[in-house]
Image: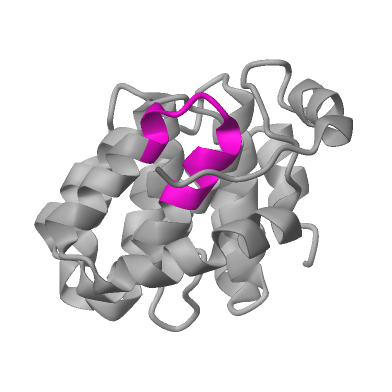
Amino acid sequence: MFKMPENKENQAPMERYMRNQFKFLGLKTPQRKAASKDFVRESKQLSIPEVMREIATLYDREEREYQYVAIDIAYANVKRLSFADIQTLTQYIQVKSWWDTVDTWRKVFGTFVVLHPVEKRRVFELFYQHPNFWMRRVSIILQLLEKNTLDTDLLTKAIVYDIDTDEFFIQKAIGWALRNYSKFNPDWVRNFVANHDLSKLAVREGTKYL
């Protein structure tokens, strides 16, 4: 069974940073990447069903770093994933949920839609209007990797659906999505902010570069 070392010195600070919701080995990102590099690379030789089983096994492990490795494996194999695989992976947004894993999974889904633009709307619909707010956070930030290919209709739908949601991580996501797109299309973002009754947090975050 794949196992990584502990760094006891880092455990308590890392657990406090995540509000003591998860147990940690104490491995910061460079250490974790080094410890899991061969394991992640070897996952590319597995079949996709085997990859899915590895991800499920890692997600069952108690220490948070194993969830990070699970996402690293998914990302390493994203070019081989189908829409059905993506659909299966969305379940992990609702398991041991916090911003660290949710936002890292977003990179997997966001990369998939860049690789398969015809599937973007179907992927978006997996998250849009979902009862779980972490899922809806992904619908808002799904297109962070995109510039000229960003679908403003989908972004608008995701933001408007949650425009009055009193949840910090939703409002922060709205601001993040707008701020990121403002680097490419400031006029669109300026117009969007002017024509929608956004929260103060979303406006502050979204207009940082304007």
Q: Please say if 163 is above or below 184.
A: above
Q: Quadrant of residue 135?
A: top left
Farthest bottom residue in view: 148
Q: Which of 115 and 79 is in front in this view?
A: 79
**In the figure, is residue 19 to the left or right of 187?**
right
Q: Which residue is drawn at 57% across and 22% down?
A: 167
- Say which quadrant the C terminus sits in: bottom right
Q: In which quarter of the image is residue 41?
A: bottom left
x then y, percent, for residue 40: 44, 64
**In the figure, is residue 59 to the left or right of 13?**
left
Specify the segment rendered in magenta: 58-70
Q: Please say if 35 is above or below 198.
A: below
x then y, percent, for residue 144: 51, 64
x then y, percent, for residue 133: 42, 27
Farthest top residue in view: 20
Q: Please say if 98 is above or below 174.
A: above
Q: Residue at x 40, y 56 (%)?
A: 155
In the image, is residue 5 part of the stretch drawn in magenta?
no
Q: Please say if 162 is above or below 118.
A: above
Report whether residue 197 is seen.
Answer: no
